[in-house]
Image (spheres, helix red, strand yellow):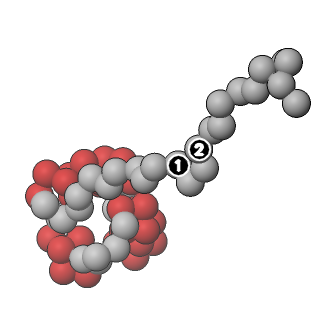
Amino acid sequence: MQIVRNNYKGFKPTFIAEKLYEEHHIKIGASTLRLWMMETGLWKKIRKTARHRTRRPKKSILEK
């Protein structure tokens, strides 16, 4: 986590996992890295936003 703290602060876990493998030859999954980053406070869980569109109520067959 020292490498992540010093070199990749502010980047997303997927990018960091790729760079750790390319530059430091450390192979680690992005999901594992994400969990470790959340434990140390380097990453916060992001909530999904509400859907952009809302569904309309279905019309009756008899309506036109």
Above or below, 3 relative to 53? below
Query: What percent of the width, then of the height, locates residue 39?
Result: 13, 51
Q: Residue at x 53, y 49 (%)?
A: 51
Query: What percent of the width, then of the height, locates residue 45?
Result: 27, 52
The residue most toward the left is: 40
2 vs 1, front mark: 2
| Residue 59 left/right relative to 27 | right
Above or below, 64 relative to 32? above
| Residue 18 left/right relative to 41 | right
Residue type at the position of mark 1? Arg
Q: Nearer the viewer, residue 12 or 58?
A: 58
Query: What percent of the width, then of the height, locates residue 31?
Result: 36, 48
Q: Nearer the viewer, residue 19 or 61?
A: 61
Q: Is residue 47 visible?
A: yes
Choose top left, top right, bottom left or bottom right for residue 3.
Answer: bottom left
Mark 2 highlights which residue? 54
Q: Nearer the viewer, residue 31 or 58?
A: 58
Look at the image and tell me in which quarter the N terminus lies. bottom left
Above or below, 50 relative to 56? below
Query: What percent of the width, then of the height, locates residue 19?
Result: 41, 72
Mark 1 highlights which residue? 51
Q: Residues within 10 Å of mark 1 (few under 14, many from 20)?
A: few
